[in-house]
Amino acid sequence: MASLNKAIRKEFFNSILPVFGQPKASVPIWNEGQKMFICDQYESVNGNRYYKGVRFCDKIVVVEKLGMYHSWTYIDSIEIYAFNEKRLELVQKRDYDKVHRSDEFVRNETKGLLCDYLCATMKLNKCNFPKEEVEIEAKTIVDSCYESFLDGRYNTQLMQILPQLK
């Protein structure tokens, strides 16, 4: 039984870290430094790298589209998705042109986009809450998207979201 477990472990590790020349299993890559999953990586003919960064909590999914040109990382867009049962709906999107990416910039932009969405939805539903409460709620939601996947308290049910993103 021990040799079977060892063989299964070896097969698993070889599928995610294969020997040169063999295909890699298609699994999202967790980037602990940026607290997001890296998806859809590719390199352009000019040598620039592009990828999507995905972070989420139980209320929203935030998708960053990024480009790496030489030694700079630029943000191309931020998209916020909300859940409609098990389906994702795009609720906010902002495109950028030649804007350097920083964590603070992305957090502030995401919070602002979420505040705009919440305020517009409140207006449509004829609700009125103080702007400060909306900003606090938006900040709380955005901050929950920055929890570490490696933390033992991370809600493993959220892993059901990843297949939805493909």
Image (tube, grey):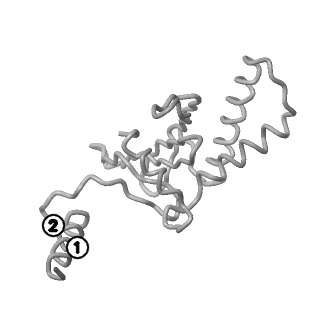
Provide the secondary structure element on which disc 1 rests.
helix
Q: Quadrant of residue 40?
A: top left
Name the residue rendered at 61%, 54% in the picture: 103
Q: Can you identify the residue that label 1 sits on? A: 9
Amino acid type, label 1: Arg
User: Where 22 sits versus 63, above or below?
Assistant: below
Q: Can you identify the residue that label 2 sits on? A: 20
Name the residue rendered at 17%, 69% in the picture: 11
User: Where 67 sits versus 152, above or below?
Assistant: above
Q: Mark on residue 154?
A: none
Q: Are marks 2 and 1 in contact (CB under 8 Å)?
A: no
N-terminal-most mark, 2 or 1: 1
Name the residue rendered at 56%, 31% in the picture: 93
User: Where 68 sits versus 31, above or below?
Assistant: above
The quadrant in which the N terminus is found is bottom left
Provide the secondary structure element on which disc 2 rests.
loop
Can you give x and y, in whole percent of width and height, for residue 50 in the image? 38, 46
Question: How dense is the environment of label 1, judged by Cα within 10 Å: few (below 14), some, or many (20 and up)?
Answer: few
Can you give x and y, in whole percent of width and height, for residue 91 in the image? 58, 28
Q: Is residue 59 left or right of residue 65?
A: right
The quadrant in which the C terminus is found is top left
Can you give x and y, in whole percent of width and height, for residue 140 in the image? 71, 49
Name the residue rendered at 56%, 34% in the picture: 82
Q: Is residue 8 left or right of residue 136?
A: left
Q: Nearer the viewer, residue 130 or 105?
A: 130
Can you give x and y, in whole percent of width and height, for residue 80 in the image? 56, 36
Q: Nearer the viewer, residue 71 or 113?
A: 113
